[in-house]
Amino acid sequence: MSHGFFLWPVQASHHAKEVDLLIGGFGVMVWLLTLPVFILIAVFVFRYRTGRDANRDHASGSNVWLEVSWSIIPFLLTLGFFVWATALYFDLRRPPAGAMTINLVARQWMWKYQHGEGAREINDLHVPVNRPVKLVMISQDVIHSVFVPALRIKQDVLPGRYTTMWFTADRLGIYPLRCAEFCGTDHSVMGGRLIVMAPQDYAGWLARNRDGGESETLAAAGARLFRSVGCSGCHGAASTVHAPPLDGLYGGPVGLSDGRALIADDQYLHDSIMLPNKDVAAGYRPIMPTYANVLASEQVNALVAYLKDIGAGKPGTRQEDGNE
């Protein structure tokens, strides 16, 4: 991590370069449009000051092309920057299909990360260079906001609701990570580091962390929870309880008892665990108990990872469990 005072943070991603170019270009346009106005103000103040012998009887006249161009050109330039900024905004909302997913749980006053391979870390986030990374984030208490200046990205982290943010860091190094939303008395110390590593170094770090006790993947931890908290007793194939099937669920449409339809995404799975009576599947009774006061956010993330694993038709541990 670089130390010292810098007027401009380093650029650690292509998006950061695009944002800097956008802001710089917009700043140049504003200067080009406003500087002539201030120059003319100064000229007119000097030329027509009190006591100055100047002809103040100007004949009325107009130049249609000058007046139209003075309005149309700034409008078109501003519209161009709007389109450019909108494209960057939508790009941040469309993570690549193969992006590596890392879950983030924010709480006063720390960041807790869960890697899909099983590694966990607090405040520091290790990622490989030149690989898209998607953060799936939720808060345990109040609103937080992840801000990485070197990437020029910021996203609010909300209680009870998943938000996402993705990036591709293309420069090795260690960069500060901050909370950009006032979240309580120790908000100022809620920080961390984004550590961008070479792929082989990241693989070594991941192996060391897994050897340190986090050997099971996030989905495997979810499979274990699926059995231990009793989910398999109702949603298993051998269950006598009439509960919705989970195989092939993720990513597909779900008809609800009130006639609506939803896509079974991460938020739907989260709400089905924590708020089971919010969106009841059509044809089923609202008898599932809530796990809001039973499971921590990290455990819910593990369950969601497992449900995504079996719901997307991927090979998992579900078939190994006789009562599931």
Image: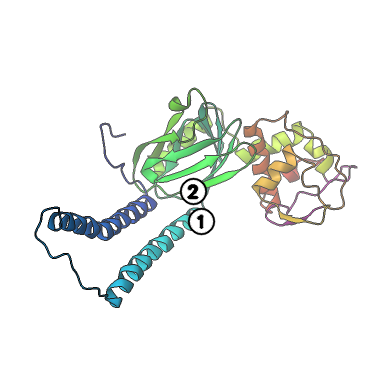
Mark 1 Cα within 10 Å, few/some/many (few <14, many 20+)?
some
The residue positioned 67% from the left and 55% from the top of the image is 251
**Which residue, given by chain and number where applicable, does mark 1 sit on?**
96
Q: Main secondary structure of the magenta part?
A: loop
Residue 5 percent location from the top left of the image: 26, 33
Report, in whole angstroms, how far the alpha carbon at label 1 lies from the one at label 2. 9 Å
Residue closest to the eye, 119 or 241: 241
> What residue type is disc 2 on?
Trp
Q: Which quadrant holds residue 269?
A: top right
Residue range of the region highlighted in magenta in the rendering: 237-256
Position of the C terminus by quadrant: top right
Which residue ends up furthest to the right in the rendered image? 240
The residue positioned 42% from the left and 49% from the top of the image is 168
Q: Which mark is residue 166?
A: 2
Image position of 15 (left or right of 274): left
Q: Which quadrant holds residue 200?
A: top left
Label tally: 2
Q: State whether residue 310 is above or below residue 90.
A: above
Q: State whether residue 309 is above or below residue 75.
A: above
Q: Secondary structure at mark 1?
A: loop
Residue 301 percent location from the top left of the image: 63, 38
Asked whether disc 1 touches disc 2, contact meaning CB atoms under 8 Å apart, the reply is yes
Image position of 295 (left or right of 38): right
Q: State whether residue 196 is above or below residue 260.
A: above
> What residue type is disc 1 on?
Pro
